[in-house]
Each structure stands twice: as structure tokens, then as C-alpha cells.
Amino acid sequence: MDGNGRWAEQQGEHRVMGHANGVRSVREALLAATEIGVEYLTLYAFSTENWKRPTAEVEALMDLLVRTVIGELAELHTNGVRLNTIGDIDSLPENCRKTLQEAIEATKNNDRITITLALSYSARWEIVNMARKLATMAAQGTLDPATITDATISEHLTTVGMPDPELLIRTSGEQRVSNFLLWQIAYAELWFTPVLWPDFRKEHLFQAVLDYQNRERRFGLVSEQITPR
Ligand code: IPE
Ligand code: MG
């Protein structure tokens, strides 16, 4: 979800206004995804690197997070949405953690769609943690390094139990991955749009999915193996 700051600056407003206006886009993306049967939507809301932004902006983002989760909870529940988070949740302010925990608990039995907020998340942070866990197990003798497979790695990332993303959308014209789900996006289709996040609407998500549906995913094979004649 990129481009909030630029969106606000374009209108002569403070960056925080852009974040506040991005909430509607989250709602639209979630509704659009739910409508077409997407089962997992993961939003990169706050990166490990974002902590280095000016304190006032970080505080405003945390505040917005709390207000949004509280304000949307009933609606999420009605729509069958299960809330989930990935990232270093322990590093979030106490009231954020509490609000998130309560919302996760309240929506845990919903099964229409899982919305995952990546908070204080970065893929390298996650991979470092995974390496530490596996190394500790190996050192303790509970894991034989020779038995480590792709699945072992996946099971020790914060996305454990979630399918790998099929489609990655980045807004605001940047064509980078910026430390997001690096292991998990090995075969994801990438979709970039110049639209700034606060302007992102249902039709943009539909456009991305249509585009995705017209691509041929070969997973390293040749075309004939995917669609035999
Ligand atoms: C994305 O918008 C939202 C967060 C990182 C929380 P930005 O704040 O990165 O907006 P730009 O890139 O400065 O326009
Ligand atoms: Mg940005």
C-alpha cells in the first residue's frame, strides 16, 4: 500500500492525511477480494524500516491502526473476515497489541477471507528468525539439517499455514518488492500500478486479477506441460 504521503502532499496536506484516506482503499480492496472469492489478502501496513520515520508519523499510524481496527471490527465480523497479523507484533505499542489480539480472537472462527496485516514486518527479519529457530533445533539435536526442505522453511516463517501469494500488487508506480514476503513470492505474479494507495478502488483490484488470469504461470516448465494439447 504505497503512495499515501505523496497523495497528501499533492493536495498540500500533511502526510498523515494520506494514511487516513488509505483506510477507504483497504475497505474497498477487502470487499473486492471477498466478492471474487479470494481467501487470503495480505497488506503491507508497516515495515521494520518504517520505525525510522519521524516519531509523529509513526504515532499517527499506530493510532490510525487502533482506531481502524476498533471501528471496522463489527463489519469485518459480519462479512466473515478473519483478522491475522505477521511481523514483530511485540514491538508495537501496548494498546495496538491489545486491540489486535482482541480483534483476532473475536474473528478467529470466520472463514470467508483472511486479512493479514504485516506490521513491523520485513522479510529479512522473518528469515533471520527462521534461521535462528532451525539452527537452535539442529544444535539441540531435534532437527537433522539433511532433512530440511522447502516445507521446513515455510513452516518456520510467520506465514506458516498460509498459501504463498499468487499475485502481488504494488501501488504508486514503484517497481520494487521492498523486503516483503521474499521467500513466499517465489512464483507470485507481480502487478504494478501508478495509482496512489488512497485512490485505489475495487476496479483496480479487479483489473489486477483480470490481468493475472491472462498470464500463463509455468513454474519453470514449458507451455505444453501446463496446457497439454
Ligand atoms: C504507504 O505510503 C503507507 C505506509 C508506509 C505506512 P507512504 O507513506 O510510503 O507514502 P509515500 O511513498 O511517501 O508517498
Ligand atoms: Mg512509500
Image (spheres, helix red, strand yellow):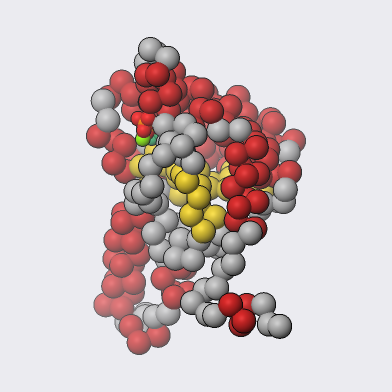
Q: Nearer the viewer, residue 217 or 34?
A: 217
> Residue 151 at x, y = what percent?
47, 74
The image quarter containing residue 105 is top right
> Residue 66 at x, y = what percent?
49, 27
> Residue 155 at x, y = what percent?
47, 68
The image quarter containing residue 174 is top left
Viewed as shown, does residue 1 lie left or right of 27?
A: left
Question: What residue is at 47 percent from the left and 46 percent from the top?
Answer: 192
Q: Quadrant of ligand 1?
A: top left
Classify the position of the C terminus by image quarter: bottom right
Question: What residue is at 25 percent from the left and 34 percent from the top?
Answer: 52
Viewed as shown, does residue 106 lie left or right of 165?
A: right
Hey, which residue is sitting farthest top in the picture? 12
Viewed as shown, does residue 228 lie left or right of 12?
A: right
Position of 138 relative to 82 (above/below): below
Question: What residue is at 65 percent from the left and 51 percent from the top?
Answer: 210
Q: Nearer the viewer, residue 28 or 50?
A: 28
Question: What residue is at 48 percent from the left and 22 percent from the top?
Answer: 20
Position of 78 relative to 85 (above/below): above
> Is residue 221 something that shows in the picture?
yes
> Residue 122 at x, y = what percent?
35, 50
The image quarter containing residue 96 is top left
